[in-house]
């Protein structure tokens, strides 16, 4: 096998240097089809090898804690990708012979194999092995026409095609099996990236997916005419808003004896001069602008250190806008005060107009409600905010946006 794979490697390498632009259109499409078919056939070989490595215990014998960890080091994969490879290998190994043959022939993809294997398992439980064999033939044929998502939808009614006499009675069993798979497959992976960023990947069951959509969809709409975020950025910020609301509710389980909170550590000089970074209690570093923005929020517990690392302050309540002061702020602003924004108070942070680190007091005349998006906008752009003659917030746009810099106000919220 090693020699044959080496020959295949040489053949593929010979294609890499070929100029695709020189191909006629029919040749281009044919080459793409051939490359895809070859990719699936190689996937069948790779998954068989992974399954054998896992079954032999090669990873543990070589000092790794699991096959996924061994694959991460050997193939330089992420842990989620390595685990998925091990799971797919097991799935393909358990699939009917006809399905494995179809994958080896490049007729189906590995994702389609997962769908077919799950469906055949359900059919065998509901109707027996003979009907399951008939289902394999139908599903492999469908796989040549439909992508994995549509194949999954069609497979829910496979008994209508292979065993119509028991289809209705088996529908409930199939639904239960699908629910069990959703429960089994649910997961959320949080992977650390560079500069303190996280990558979220996972699969939500139907109930959790509904809850997530209900929570973030209303917050994912543009926040006003100035909102130039793409849809993905708006969903990201909506998730952050939901997390802020959960922290503000004070109903999360305790963590180490303390209520759930975020601790930001920075030097006092660095904070006041905007020169120093901050560090979260998770060890992730933050920019000075981010530290100053987080210091506005009552759900953040700032820990300020002196030049020698001495703790000068941990969460002084006099600079956190909470309790009666926040309620007064809600009554005055009614929600995010930025022009054109309709976010309600529960999604908003309390922002110091004149930052506390620069000597700004914590009172109603030095505070304004801002949603997460516009809180970041104020801290990172040239907009300024002040209270007008009637003690309500007004925002001065940057000169590049409005050369006259005429003050703007929010007209969405009822004024008290």
Image: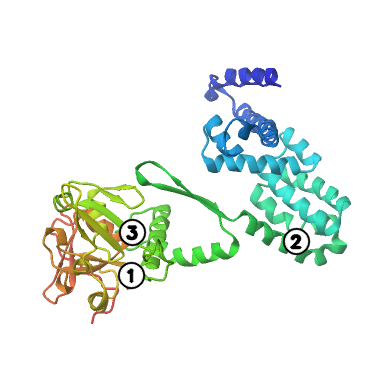
Foreground residue among 46 and 142 = 46
Residue 28 image-quadrant placement: top right
Asked which secondary structure carries label 1, the reply is: loop
The tag earlier along the polypeptide, 2 or 3, is 2
Question: On the image, numbered disc 3 is attached to which residue?
Answer: 262
Give the crowd class for mark 2: few <14, some 14-19, many >=20 residues within 10 Å. Answer: many
Is residue 63 shown left or right of residue 2?
left
Q: Is any atom of residue 170 visible in this view?
A: yes
Q: How far apart are marks 2 and 1 (CA)?
A: 44 Å
Between 107 and 59, which is closer to the camera in this rendering?
Answer: 59
Q: Residue furthest bottom?
A: 416
Q: Residue 174 carries which label?
A: 2
For the residues labelled 2 and 3, the Cα–Cα distance comes to 44 Å
Residue shown at the point (24%, 47%) measured from the top left: 277
Q: Nearer the viewer, residue 309 or 270?
A: 309
Instruction: Please tell me whether mark 3 sits on a helix, a strand or a loop.
Output: strand
**Residue identifier under label 1:** 342
Q: Where is residue 149 in the image (x, y as percent from the top left)?
A: 64, 51
Quadrant in the picture for the N terminus:
top right
At which x and y percent is residue 342?
Answer: 33, 70
Q: Please, what secondary structure does the residue beneath circle 2 have?
A: helix
């Amino acid at each position: 096998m090693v020699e044959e794979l080496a020959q295949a490697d040489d053949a593929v390498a010979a294609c890499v240097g070929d100029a695709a632009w020189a191909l006629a259109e029919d040749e281009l499409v044919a080459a793409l089809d051939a490359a895809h078919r070859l990719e699936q056939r190689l996937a069948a070989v790779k998954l068989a090898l992974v399954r054998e490595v896992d079954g032999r215990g090669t990873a543990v014998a070589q000092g790794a804690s699991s096959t996924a960890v061994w694959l991460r080091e050997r193939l330089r994969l992420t842990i989620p990708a390595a685990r998925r490879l091990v799971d797919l290998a097991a799935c393909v190994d358990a699939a009917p012979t006809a399905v494995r043959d179809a994958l080896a022939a490049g007729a189906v993809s590995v994702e389609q194999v997962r769908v077919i294997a799950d469906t055949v398992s359900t059919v065998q439980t509901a109707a027996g092995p003979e009907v399951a064999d008939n289902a394999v033939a139908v599903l492999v044929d469908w796989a040549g026409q439909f992508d994995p998502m549509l194949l999954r939808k069609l497979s829910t009614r496979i008994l209508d095609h292979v065993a119509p006499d028991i289809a209705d009675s088996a529908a409930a069993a199939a639904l239960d099996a699908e629910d069990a798979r959703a429960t089994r497959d649910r997961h959320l992976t949080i992977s650390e990236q560079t500069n303190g960023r996280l990558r979220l990947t996972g699969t939500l069951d139907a109930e959790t997916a509904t809850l997530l959509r209900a929570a973030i969809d209303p917050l994912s709409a543009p926040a006003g005419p100035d909102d130039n975020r793409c849809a993905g950025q708006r969903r990201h910020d909506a998730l952050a808003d939901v997390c802020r609301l959960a922290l503000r509710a004070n109903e999360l389980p305790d963590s180490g004896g303390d209520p759930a909170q975020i601790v930001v550590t920075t030097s006092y000089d660095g904070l006041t001069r905007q020169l120093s970074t901050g560090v979260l209690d998770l060890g992730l570093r933050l920019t000075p602008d981010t530290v100053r923005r987080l210091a506005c929020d009552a759900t953040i517990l700032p820990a300020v250190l002196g030049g020698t690392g001495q703790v000068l302050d941990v969460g002084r309540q006099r600079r956190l806008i909470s309790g009666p002061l926040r309620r007064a702020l809600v009554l005055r602003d009614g929600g995010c005060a930025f022009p054109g924004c309709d976010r309600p108070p529960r999604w908003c942070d309390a922002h110091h107009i004149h930052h506390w680190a620069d000597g700004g007091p914590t009172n109603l005349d030095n505070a304004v409600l801002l949603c997460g998006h516009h809180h970041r906008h104020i801290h990172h752009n040239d907009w300024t905010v002040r209270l007008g003659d009637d003690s309500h917030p007004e925002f001065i746009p940057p000169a590049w946006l409005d050369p006259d810099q005429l003050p703007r106000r929010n007209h969405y919220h009822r004024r008290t």
